[in-house]
Image (spheres, rainbow, N blue to C red):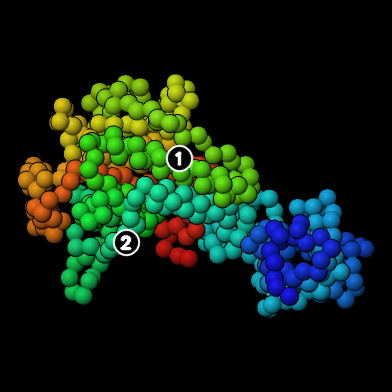
Amino acid sequence: MQRILSSQLPAQVGSTVRLAGWVHRRRLLKSVAFLVLRDGGGLAQVVVAAPAVRAQVEALTEETVVEVVGTVVANPAAPAGVEVVDPTVRPLGPPAVPPPFDLYRPVLTAGLSTQLDHAPVALRHPIRSAALRISAAAVSGFRATLDGQGFVEVHTPKVVASSTESGANVFALDWFGRPAYLAQSPQFYKQLMVGVFERVYEVGPVFRAEPHDTARHLAQYTSLDVELGFVADHRGVMAVLRDTLAGMVATVADRAGGALATLGVTVPEVPAEIPAVHFTEALKIAGAPADEPDLAPAHERALGEWALREHGSDFLFVTGYPMAKRPFYTHPDPARPAYSNGFDLLFRGVELVTGGQRLHRHADYLAALAARGEPVEPYAGYVDAFRHGMPPHGGFAIGLERFVARLTGAANVREVTAFPRDLHRLTP
């Protein structure tokens, strides 16, 4: 008999079925016992009346893996309106050691640190796994949207010979006796691949050795990177980003509806045109000094509130960041060279995306590095490619975990990360 999932039970009323999964919970009443089975489709209620089977169930521990064969009957009070009766129960392994928290409770009562210490089992809780299902759907929507616009997925090295962002902290390692670093982003490589495919994207890990110990930062996270050629300026990049976000949100709604319901979350509307303000105007809205070189988290929150109040939008573009706060490959605004053709996208008052137009002329790269006192040699393999003809281009990067955290309302990005890596955590 082929195994089915609990989610398929409503279509099997009157049939004998085989289920397999984990003992989620047992309720031992005087006249009957209930075994709640958890599998990849959800929960199934199994009604146990036979004394011999009841004795088996009483001996089980939560999280033991079992097989159940029984008959499906309708019961409006049971999960999905059905339950399994007259079962046989067969353990598929030894009795499980219960985790240090009850997975059957509506919420995990353990603190986040304890959950992360025991992540392999904590992630089994429906609330924790729901966030990961949303994450998977978001990536699927990211890929599908860009595939539909003629982009090609690429896979670039995660061990590099020089840092991607000058002045930033990197993780150093030994590469057969030579110094190397974990890649902070695929920035250089995705730009070079524009010279091959014109439009590319990548889904992969990036590594930041920044000493941040906050609820929004990780030392390793998943970056959704995009780069496209033959743009007029950064606004063409922003248009692609808007469509990409709309595709991600729509796919989450379509493919992760159950997960959204588990978390009590509704997806935001992505406006046909996301409101945008120049950096100088953003400072005024946020009440920041006019000479402030960047936006602090408090400024971002104020801007998010303004966008929702004035435009009814959870999203806001801030364009024209000062060149002094942007990487050397950023294209300046021709009309205001002190400002960039770059942008950030705020999602509910938190920076989600950084992007913009890049330099594309070899001479401009040499000048940009010289202006910052940077030697050319560490970037030679990257900069040299621009001698061979590169189109005007630009791109952006979305932090997946931060996107899911903002979407679900998680207070800490670690709540939506399977096995987070930060200043303090290298295991499990």
Q: Please tell me whether residue 404 is drawn above or below residue 298 in the rendered image.
A: below
Residue nearest the viewer, comparing 222 with 12: 12
Q: Label 2: few (<14), some or many (≥20) within 10 Å? A: few
One can see residue 2 in this view: yes
One can see residue 378 in this view: no
Q: Position of residue 320 (x, y in %)?
A: 25, 31
Residue nearest the viewer, comparing 19 with 222: 19
Identify residue type, mark 2.
His
Q: Label 1: few (<14), some or many (≥20) within 10 Å? A: many
Identify residue type, mark 1.
Ala
Q: Position of residue 3 (x, y in %)?
A: 70, 71
Q: In the image, what residue occupies the spot 15% across and 45% down? A: 360
Quarter residue 189 falls in: bottom left
Q: In the image, what residue occupies the spot 46% across and 45% down? A: 248
The residue identified by callout 2 is 155
Q: Position of residue 407 (x, y in %)?
A: 50, 42
Q: Quick one: SS at disc 1?
A: helix
Residue nearest the viewer, comparing 9 with 297: 9
Q: Is residue 368 left or right of residue 418?
A: left
Q: Please tell me whether residue 292 is drawn above or below residue 148 in the rendered image.
A: above
The residue identified by callout 1 is 246
